[in-house]
Each structure stands twice: as C-alpha cells, then as structure tokens.
Image (cartoon, rainbow, N blue to C red):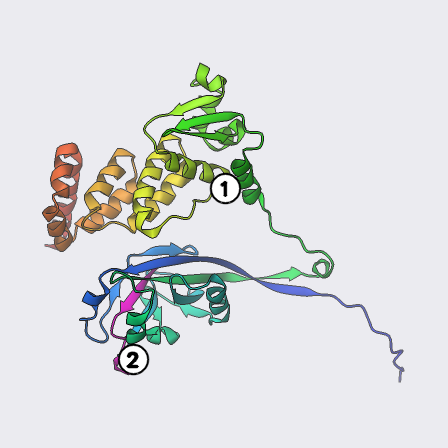
Amino acid sequence: AMASSGTSGNSSRSAIVADTASGHHFLTIHGYSCTKDLPTGEKISSRRFKVGGHRWRIDYYPNGSGSAVADYVSLSLILDEDVAAGVKAKHCFCLSGEAEKIQAARLTSAPVVTFSSRRSCFFNWYSTFIRREDLQKSKNLKNDSFTVRCDILVVHGYRAQDAAAAAFVSVPPCDLRGDLGMLLQTEKGADVVFEVGGETIAAHRCVLAARSSVFAAELFGPMKEGKAESGIVRVEDMEAEVFKALLRFVYTGSLPEMRKEEEDVTCQHLLVAADRYGMDRLKLICEEKLCEYIDVNTAATILLLSEQHHCEGLKKACFDFLASPANLRATVATDGLQHLSVSCPSLMVKLMAFIASLQLCEL
C-alpha cells in the first residue's frame, strides 16, 4: 500500500451565477372605500405591465382571496401572457413608502416561483398582505387612496463560471451611465447651450450627435445655423423639464424618477420630444408606459397623440380599449371622441371601421 504524504493536491474553484432581470411596478388604489363593497374572493385587476421581458398584472382582493383571509387585503401577481416554458421569478409586495432596504431583504428571502402560463398566479403570504383595519389606520392610506409596490426578479437561467480569478480580483460593473450622467450634471467641457422655456441648459455636442441624428444635423450638419455655431440653440415649443429628461436619456439611457400621478402627462410630452429628435428607443419606452394609462378619460387624447406621431403599437392599444362596448360608451360620455372627430376625422373613421370589423367577426 502507498502511504499518504500528507500534502494536499491542487485545488480549483468555480461558481454558478443566476442570470436575472428585475424591476418594480406601482399600483395605486383610488377610492379605496368604494372597493370594500366587493365580496370576499372577488378581485380587481391592474393593467398589464412589463418586467424582466414578461408581461404581468396584479389582482387586488379588497376583502381577501377566500373566506379564511376575509379580514385581509389580498394581492396576487399574475403572468399575463402565454409562454412556452415556465417563467421563474421572485416577487414581493409592500406599501409604497416603506424603506427600500426592507423591501430588498424581502425580495432576497422570497421563494423562486414558476409561473407556467397565462393567468398563472401565486399568493403565498400576500393572501394576508395587510389587515383591513390596519390599512385603515395606516398613514399610507391618504385621501382614500394607497399605493402598493410590487418588486419582481425574473430568473432567466444559470451559468457556470470559472471563479479561480474571482478569489483575487473583483471587477466592478461598468459605470459608463453614471459617468456620462455626471458629465451632464457638472457641465464639465460643455460646448453648447440650449435656451428652453426661459432656462439655459449646457450640454456636449459630440454626445448629442452620437445619440441623435437630428442633433447631429442641427449641431454639425446642414441644419446648423449661425446661432448653433455660436454655442446657443433655442428650442421652441418645449418645456425645460421635458428637455432635461430628454437629455438625461441621451446621456444615460434612462429616465428620471417621475411622480406616479404625473407620469402619463410627462410621457406624452417626452414622446413628442423623442419623435422630434429621432430618439426611437425613448419613443417606444414612452409608448409602452402610456399603454398602462389608457382609460375612459385619456383614450381619445392618447389615440390622437399616437396618430400624430406614428405610434402604431400605442394606437392598437387604444383601439383595443375602445373595442369594448362599455369602454366606448363611457368614453363617448366624456366628449373625448367628439373632440377627436373634429381634430382628426380620418382617425375617427379608422376607429369606427376597426370596431365594425370586430362586430362582424363576432356574428
């Protein structure tokens, strides 16, 4: 027999890394006292929203999802699309305003759940999200309204990684977004000034030209005027805050934080600005966000906006909303469609033709 020398052999190290995508959605319940009349087990569904490449919705049960939790407000996250393979995700709910660190800890400890198909849902402890009597005493219930935040982390898969080097070297993520954002904020090296809505805003020609063909033509190409050469460009028909949000997206690829009650109007203005400056991705982001705000009071306005700025996806979403007889009747009662028929009669003709085609298909 061979005796052991007592020395250890070579060692190696590897890691398994989860490929994830995360995001959150705010759902505001307006007129909470009116929803308390719903029987236990009945729900109200939110509009669809997108996180991690998938579409979701939240079901809200003001008197619990079942008799065992009738004293609670229940919530459930719904996968609102058909998928070939199950979607693995973590999620958690909280009342808006709770500390982000607490919410992050909840998401970390939440189980990974497989959502297998459209309407696949998971209640977990959110069947007892909050006692109604506690909600009614809470400072988060203001003016008969409260807001819920839903955090979702989608697990796309896992990959093996050689971790030998990781024991000695830690490579931080790329912070190009932060660096360029700081460049805009500090105005260091800025070589052009925009006058917008009575304010002056400094920026960098090369960054703008690299991100927008319209800026490139305006600052370097055939659209360049003497005032651009002098370093001052006047921007007409745009609010300063909208232009600042546009520049933030130019530099960082992200939007500033927006108050939920102002997000729909801000996105409408941003969509117009994005179309004006040829920022196609920003335009699509605004379209996607506005799809969540189509309702009886906004459908006509958003539909007209989609027609004027060639937003086919947003237009289809408006048509889909107005295809419901109940939604159409309620929208007509607001005089929104009357204004639409005057300002853009050709669009009104398209809408009526679309609704008529659906009715024929149902016969």
Residue 7: give its label: none
Does 70 appear in magenta?
Answer: no
- The residue identified by callout 2 is 69
Q: Is residue 355 visible?
A: yes
Q: Is residue 349 visible?
A: no
Q: Percent position (x, y) of residue 120?
A: 34, 68
- 152 or 203: nearer the viewer: 203
| Kind of residue sitting beneath label 2 | Val
Taking the image as shown, residue 177 lies to the left or right of residue 128, namely right
Task: Label 1, secondary structure: give it.
Answer: helix
Q: Residue at x 50, y 71 (%)?
A: 109
| Kind of residue sitting beneath label 1 | Thr
Q: Is residue 268 above or below residue 171?
A: above
- The residue identified by callout 1 is 252
- The image quadrant where one finds the C terminus is bottom left
- 116 or 202: nearer the viewer: 202
Quarter location, residue 179: top right
Q: Is residue 21 above or below residue 201?
A: below
Mark 2–mark 1 distance (CA, rounded to whole Å)? 45 Å
